[in-house]
Image (cartoon, helix red, strand yellow):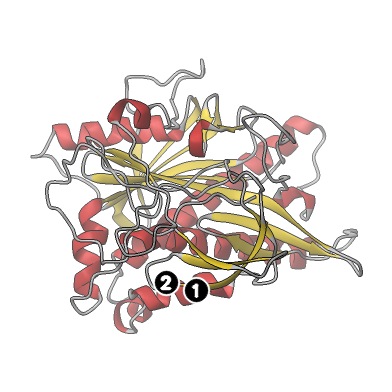
């Protein structure tokens, strides 16, 4: 999964013709991707070391741009050329917040915001930004899989961070030690998992009366899916509740996140968009009492907007801790690669079986270890053979 066996270096111009992705980023004329909102993620890792097990892929700027998701302020579900209005986060004015009711994809909206920021270098600019939407008509996952999100009620958002925030500023916070870029999907996945777990716990404890379901376990799937595990006496099921897609836009990373809050889209069992069965938070939480379904939908829209703001602030404040409010983050080594891996592993279910979706035999495997650069070592269930994965998708 990870890219090279040698550490990634930061190229200040980031102008290479191609970007290496998902755990290695892709920088193809400022465009690239790292994961997958609503697909089954993974892919695009480059292994420059002695092992030849890696899959190498380069995506040109034209094909990379076709993989992007995006949002518009326009109720016609087309991305408008105008920027939506912004507000500053109440805890940090350097985090700008945007929201649209309908768009093609929040990733499209994020690109528009980046264009505006970079076109006006003399004007003030944020350290991070969030763009969220109530619905999107053309949400995307990895390999152009469809992220079904036309219905209102789920959390659909993109967070933008300057590439220098990870490649330069984070290094300074980590005692001058470079944090592999390939750990970015794992960091974001941990933050999303943490917020989902907190939301479920709050909902469950506040509204457990009349609920006949136990609280599911929040787990992560390499490199950047979040699942809910529900166990019975005889078996366990792992259903997808969130996915992440990371791309580059000029000198920014744009991080698309989809969380199933109010409803779970139906995922095909075959074809180009086939994947893991989906679930949503509302299957485990009661909405407020509502007279009709429209009121319920609006309730989940508001829950989704808050969830988006919380995740965005979590990432922003981790990258730019306030010395007074976020003293723990700024003083305890929480910016190291090891800390990122430890947190991600805390959500991992090592016993979960995964399927290599793009291999001829679709082997079933389990994770046995994760390396410092984010690559994983897996063991085939049937043969016991182990391998290091740099670029495979899991179901």
Label 2: which secondary element? helix
Please say if 162 is above or below 18: below
The percent position of residue 44, horizontal first and vertical second, equals 41, 47
Mark 1, Cα crowd under 10 Å, few <14 / some 14-19 / many 20+, is: some
Residue 71 occupies quadrant: top left
Determine if residue 153 is in view: yes
Please say if 374 is above or below 56: below
The percent position of residue 39, horizontal first and vertical second, equals 57, 41
Q: Which mark is residue 192?
A: none
Q: Residue at x 48, y 24 (%)?
A: 104
Label 1: which secondary element? helix
Question: Which of 211 and 252 lies nearest the eye of the viewer?
Answer: 252
Q: Residue at x 72, y 41 (%)?
A: 264
Q: Which mark is residue 340?
A: 2
Verify CB contact (< 8 Å) between mark 1 and mark 2.
yes
Please say if 308 is above or below 181: above
Q: Residue at x 24, y 50 (%)?
A: 162
Question: Which of 230 and 159 lies nearest the eye of the viewer?
Answer: 230
The answer to whether residue 143 is left or right of residue 214 is left
Question: Which of 137 and 272 lies nearest the eye of the viewer?
Answer: 272
Quarter holding the N terminus is bottom left
The percent position of residue 266, horizontal first and vertical second, equals 74, 35
The answer to whether residue 191 is left or right of residue 336 is right
**Whole-number angstrom distance, CA of label 1 to CA of label 2:** 5 Å
The percent position of residue 225, horizontal first and vertical second, equals 57, 54
Mark 2, Cα crowd under 10 Å, few <14 / some 14-19 / many 20+, is: many
Q: Residue at x 64, y 60 (%)?
A: 199
For disc 1, the marked residue is 343
Determine if residue 286 is in view: no
Please say if 190 is above or below 71: below
- Residue farthest to the top? 76
The answer to whether residue 203 is left or right of residue 311 is right
């Amino acid at each position: 999964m990870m890219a090279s066996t040698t550490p990634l270096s930061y190229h200040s111009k980031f102008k290479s013709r191609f970007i290496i992705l998902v755990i290695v980023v892709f920088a193809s004329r400022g465009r690239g991707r790292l994961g997958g909102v609503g697909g089954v993620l993974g892919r695009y890792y480059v292994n420059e070391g002695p092992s030849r097990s890696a899959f190498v892929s380069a995506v040109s700027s034209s094909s990379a741009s076709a993989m992007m998701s995006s949002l518009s302020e326009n109720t016609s579900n087309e991305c408008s050329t105008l920027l939506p209005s912004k507000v500053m986060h109440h805890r940090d004015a350097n985090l700008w917040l945007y929201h649209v009711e309908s768009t093609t994809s929040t990733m499209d909206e994020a690109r528009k915001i980046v264009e505006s920021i970079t076109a006006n270098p003399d004007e003030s600019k944020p350290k991070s930004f969030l763009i969220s939407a109530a619905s999107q008509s053309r949400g995307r996952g990895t390999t152009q899989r469809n992220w079904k999100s036309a219905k209102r009620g789920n959390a659909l958002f993109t967070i933008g961070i300057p590439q220098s925030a990870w490649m330069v500023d984070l290094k300074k916070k980590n005692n001058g030690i470079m944090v592999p870029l390939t750990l970015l999907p794992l960091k974001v996945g941990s933050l999303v998992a943490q917020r989902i777990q907190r939301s479920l716990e709050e909902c469950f404890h506040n509204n457990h009366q009349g609920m006949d379901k136990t609280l599911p376990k929040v787990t992560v799937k390499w490199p950047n899916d979040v699942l809910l595990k529900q166990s019975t006496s005889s078996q366990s099921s792992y259903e997808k509740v969130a996915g992440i897609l990371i791309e580059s836009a000029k000198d920014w990373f744009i991080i698309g996140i989809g969380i199933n809050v109010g409803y779970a889209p139906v995922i095909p069992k075959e074809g180009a968009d086939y994947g893991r069965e989906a679930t949503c938070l509302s299957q485990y939480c009661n909405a407020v009492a509502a007279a009709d379904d429209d009121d319920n939908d609006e309730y989940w829209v508001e829950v989704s907007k808050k969830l988006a703001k919380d995740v965005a602030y979590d990432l922003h404040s981790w990258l730019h801790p306030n010395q007074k409010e976020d003293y723990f983050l700024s003083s305890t080594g929480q910016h190291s690669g090891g800390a990122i891996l430890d947190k991600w592993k805390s959500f991992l279910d090592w016993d979960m079986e995964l399927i290599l979706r793009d291999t001829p035999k679709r082997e079933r495997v389990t994770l046995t270890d994760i390396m410092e650069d984010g690559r994983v070592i897996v063991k085939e269930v049937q043969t016991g053979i182990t391998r290091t994965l740099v670029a495979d998708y899991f179901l």
